Image (cartoon, coloured by chain):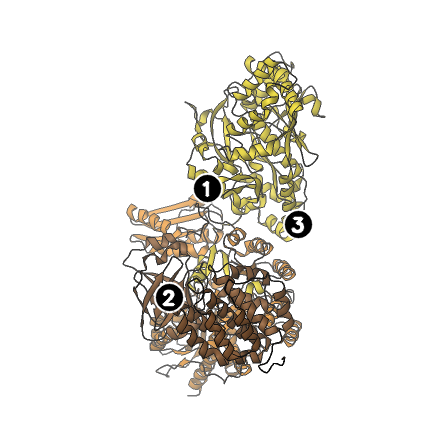
Amino acid sequence: MTARAVQARSASVPIRVPAVASLALKRLFSPGDVNATVLGASSHAVWLLAGGEVVVVSTRDATRLPNSVEVAARSGAGLFDSVTHGESVVVGRNALEFGSFIVELVRWWDPRPALPSASISDVASAIRGLPHTVPAINSGVLRSALAAGSPDHLVGASAGLLGRGPGLTPEGDDVLAGALAAIRTLGTALGSRPALAMLDASQAALVDAANDRTTTFSAALISCAARGEVAAPAGIFLRALAGRGHVGSSHRDLLRVGHTSGPALAAGIVLGALSLIEPHATPNGGVQ
Amino acid sequence: MIARVEIHPGRYHDSVRLMQASKALQNVEGVTDALVAMATELNLSLLADMGFDMDAVADAGPNDLVLALRAENEGAIATAHLVLDDALTHKAAPSGGLDAPDPKTVGSAAAVGDANIALLSVPGEHAFVEAMEALESGRHVMIFSDNVPIEQEIILKTYGGDHGLLVMGPDCGTTIVNGIGLGFANAVQPGSVSMVGASGTGIQQMCALLDDAGIGVRHALGTGSRDLSEDVGAASTLQALQALDEDPATDLIAVISKPPAAPIAEKVRRAAETCGKPVVITFMGERTLEEGAGDVLAALGKPPAQYGSWPAANEDHRPGSVRGLFSGGTLSSEAQFVVAPILGEVGSREGGEGHTFVDYGDDEYTQGRAHPMIDQTVRIERLSAAARDETVGVILMDVVLGYGANANPATELAPFIEQAVTAGAAVVVSLCGTRGDPQGRDAQAEILNRAGASVFLSNAAAAREVARLATARTSA
Amino acid sequence: MSDLSNLLDTEPVVATAGTDLLAESIEQQGAEVIRTDWRPPEAGTEAALAALAADGRNTKANETAVARMLAVRPQFVDVSVARDVFPDMTPRTFFHAGPPLTWDRASGPMRGAIIGAMMYEGLADGPEDAEAKAMRGEIDLSPCHHHGAVGPMAGVTSPSMPVAVVADGAGDGVAYSTLNEGLGKVLRYGAFAPEAIDRLHWMDAVLGPVLSAVLQSRGPIDLQSLIAQALQMGDDGHNRNRAVTSLFLRELGGALVDGADAPVDQRADVFRFIDGNDHFMLNLVMAAGKLGSDAASDVPASSLVTVMARNGTDFGIRLSGTGDEWFVAPAPPVDGLYLGSFTEEDASPDIGDSTITETVGLGGFAMAAAPAIVGFVGGTAAGAVRRTLAMYEITLAEHPMYQIPMLEFRGTPVGIDAARVVRTGVLPQINTGVAGKVPGTGMVGAGLVEAPMECFAQAIRALAATLD
């Protein structure tokens, strides 16, 4: 879909654009139409509120998020130019109907990265090669909570991070999301049952806390992260940490995402990964 | 009546685009005959057969475009020219700004957008040079083209193997990577079953069966029809098998092919044994894809499946032989394999007596035409002929859906199926498609069924039905 | 064997060649496809192309050859006399532009230039005498290219002429060229009038020695640096040379004013001469190109085009991997703008070694840097850019030093691959001047011409034959 193609069509005939949607959105696209509202739009993305959920409709050159529908067009084609805040969009079985264009779902993608089984030494050596990135936000409490392995501490630590820092997704949210995603995905790849158990036990409370303390959009991403559903560049980085793919270049690509998002996500992922490979204190003070 | 023959030297278009253009010209009001084609020997003889003056094309060669028109008046000729220009206007490739010219080779195209796969459907004698260039620039290659010399296939696969690149083909009609189909492929649900196949239609049938059983597909790597020959030695099959074994997104691997020579079959089996994941091998001709699919389901801990079918409203039909009108060799061979033990010998050539299954995808029937999965003209003619032929009792046809195939095959076939059923023949359709296919699998099934055919999603099941109908009538 | 992770771990991005249906169905699935405007290769070259692709040495050989072409550092070090620098030059030897040529096949401007040179050397009393002697075979004709030299238009080089010496600052190579006479009644356009011959005498008596003295005084001049700057000032290195000539004059600068060991009036004449000739530096740019061309020669299995040259009758090319062999075809007509009342009727077939510039990434291959040239050769500015862009398809590299500002300083397309020419049907684009067919007429116009496909087809077949 090129800019010329977009302009060439008359206003009365809606353009049909093929798109691929995250499996995380499957529930939304069911028989029976749902009315959605546009929360915001840019050349790269449209944010919709549909059935209480935030859905992103993004272009091919934008970051693919776990709650997004990616259209087969680049931002330069100007597909979203006509979209306005508050506009109504009809979400059908396989389509999103905007005023002048229809997004047709032709495929699904899985936002959970497929990781190979990994060993602690695999992950450790992957992390060793990384440049040390320190997020602006203080994540010390989170680090301790993960080391302690306690669900309550984890929820407590999240309270200090949620909603903190600049960005559509506040920096603190991204660090937390990165850590949760690492525990879910790398934890599974490593077979770290205690860490996974901690996450399972705290998942509901974390999602509640997110809904209370931060933007709906960011809360959705945290909820995704706890389930191991991540933005595509984060997925590639996680897979590289597990031993498949190139750690250095996937880390660099993740750092480039967004303004603070990428570095914060990366820092959170590393934090989460470290907690999985370092021996940690049990609540009664022993070492596991 | 005005006749016009023109040569446009050095203007090249692929044969499918030219056939579409010819069709468009024939539809112009006032045009009685039209042909636009590259001036190959075959096309020039077609031109002569159409009664055009051959003097005008005396100097034309295979790289020249020839346009021949017969029309009622000059106005029609003028319109035809406009229609031709429109039909042959090249779609703009994405350019890097500043009106850059379109890439002329697959190597430079791949560089434009950093492609990781080159998909070649150029004439077979030219595929090797493009494929080598793609490999040398670090791209995997899928060669849809056939008629590529085997020596070239071996060179390509040797290079690919040495450089960690997969050569899919030559004569590879289907590949799926991460759910995206290249060539003729069906829409699949995301899943963790992957395939390696030397038969494109075999891959398609397996995808269809698994899809109906609710199983998604991750990758289906085509290897080309000759990969399991002794000369090629299963190079791509083994390479793909190993890669899928290491792919974290794959949990089970299905291998599909017609039966290879014993040493190659052994090689593949041994490689499968060293895989860490379950491998289900289906050498068609030893067993059916339905059986293979059954093993896949069992390995996944799923119950056996009952694949969808739409029985014909009326079972009565006249006695007679079975005529199979297939769009490709794989489903035809599988159907023969199923019916032969019950019905006896099945012929593969037209005009024979007794049961006959013909593959209309064969070169013999596709001169100057698109593949029967796209262009059903020849099979429709044969369907009508079978309907009129009192010695034919049962007609079996495959209809393959998916990307790349005919947009609405059922609607095209329906009137002719009705005719056949009215004439007294039973019609059975093996419908190869998935729920997500662009044609709408179930809608296609219903159209065929309403026209009087019994429809089966499993080719083996369709074949069994054919055997049942043929023997039931015989014993009546 | 590898894990094919760069295939399996991402959604495919597909480059297609062939049926558009396959590209369309990929797009229908919302995946990315890049189409190719593919066509079959030139008839009769299929087997040769397949042999090259199967052999496997061609790609590496081309990389080596083009790297050598780009590694030279041409320096203008001296001006000498032809008889002193060419070991094979006898008193009766005349070098000429283009592939080998015999008198009987030579065009008007070429004959005129040979006649003029014979008179200049004192080998003939007048034009009829010269012609008669030439027809009797009393002179030797040899391509400049065979002697490490190049010459624009007729390119006739004779024993007494001054020649520029261009040496490789990064290696041992040397290349030579005559000095540019200017426009009007000049030898290279086939003029043999007294003014043309008088000028030649002045050049060997004054121009040559003064330039030599200046170079001794200020040291060698880096030509590549001048050319690179000139490209960013609107020159193309073939038909527009005003900027590079101006820069050159500045380089001569102080040493020309004083410092050079030559009489002041001669130095003044030399200044005025160069100042009045916008094309003075063409010959030096050509010699710099010849240096790169020779450096890139003789790499086995390489399909790099090292020479494109015309002798007024034939267009000839050479490839790196086929040694000294020339591949010739009739010189094609020029699509151009004619000066004054001249028409195509007045035009001589394409002539000159100046296509050495296109061979090293200049001229037609740098038109996008010199869109103003369209006022000279015809067409539109946008068309000039498109012609350069089209050349990237058939070249092996992007020049590390010659950059085009309006293409975001992309290096010019350099290193023509004959295999790619034959595969794609894209022919090298040349900007050229047109000589009048009547000897001595001078320039009648300028325009665009494409190198003939036949040369490349022959060359590729010959290259394939060397592989066994």
Q: Quadrant of the C terminus of chain B?
A: bottom left
Residue at the disc numbered 2: A104
User: Element under label 1?
Assistant: helix
Q: Amino acid at mark 2?
A: Glu
User: In 3D space, how far apart are the residues under numbered discs 3 and 1 (Cα atoms)?
Assistant: 32 Å
Q: Which chain is orange?
A: B
**Residue A100 placement: quadrant:** bottom left
**Is B65 situated left or right of C159 in this image?**
left
Q: Pinpoint the chain carrying mark 3.
A: C
The residue lying toward the viewer, choosing from C274 and B38, is C274
Chain C, which colour? yellow
Residue at the disc numbered 3: C57
Instruction: Farthest residue to the bottom: give it.
Output: B476
Q: Is residue B313 visible?
A: yes
Q: Residues within 10 Å of mark 3 (few under 14, many from 20)?
A: some
Q: Is residue B380 visible?
A: no
Q: Which chain is brown?
A: A
Q: Residues within 10 Å of mark 2 (few under 14, many from 20)?
A: many
Residue at the disc numbered 1: C386
Q: Nearer the viewer, mark 3 or mark 1?
A: 1
